[in-house]
Image (spheres, rainbow, N blue to C red):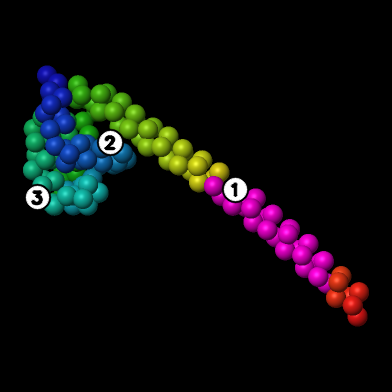
Amino acid sequence: MPTKLSKLFSSGSRVEILEALYYASNGLGLRQIAELCNLHVHSAEVALKQLHTEKLVKRAKQKQRLFYSLNTQNDNYELLKSIFITTETRKISARSALHTNEAKQLMNFIGASQSMIKKARNSYHGNSRAIKKNN
């Protein structure tokens, strides 16, 4: 049975953890997750236990450590995937627009600089000709 959306997104910590696990190519340890999500280790542990109970997250023991990963077999996986992809696409679009605006400003600055350099060269060459005539 799928987890209710209200439960799925009931806290920012849960969403941050799910997103970190979505983008991780391999499982992540508790401390890695806490650091990536800017959470206290205990807060990350509590959220991970809940996510594991809801079968949104799998855990595997390697040596003496637990590694967590997203459960791709969960009924909500495709929904999470589409949300994370859409979010990332919007972030990229926003950054692209920002970079386009910065590039336009830079091009305007370069144009103005070139104009100033040209005027300075003309002024310099004009002054040097006048000096030569006076000598």
126 is higher (above) or lower (below) than 47: below
* Outermost bottom residue: 135
Give the SS element for disc 3.
helix
Q: Nearer the viewer, residue 33 or 134?
A: 134
Q: Nearer the viewer, residue 34 or 133?
A: 133
Our reading of the magenta stretch's main secondary structure is helix
Asked if the stretch drawn in magenta spans residue 125, the answer is yes
The label on residue 42 is 3
- Check contact, mark 2 vs mark 3: CB within 8 A: no
Q: Is residue 12 visible?
A: yes
* Outermost top residue: 1
Residue type, mark 2 in image? Tyr
Residue that carries the numbered disc 1 in the rendered image: 108
* Image location (x, y in percent) of residue 109: 59, 52
**Magenta stretch bounds:** 105-128
Q: CA distance from mark 2 to mark 3?
A: 21 Å
Residue that carries the numbered disc 2 in the rendered image: 22
- Check contact, mark 2 vs mark 1: CB within 8 A: no
Residue type, mark 3 in image? His
Q: Dividing the picture into quarters, in which one does residue 86 lie?
A: top left
Q: Is residue 51 left or right of residue 23?
A: left
User: How many numbered marks appear?
Assistant: 3
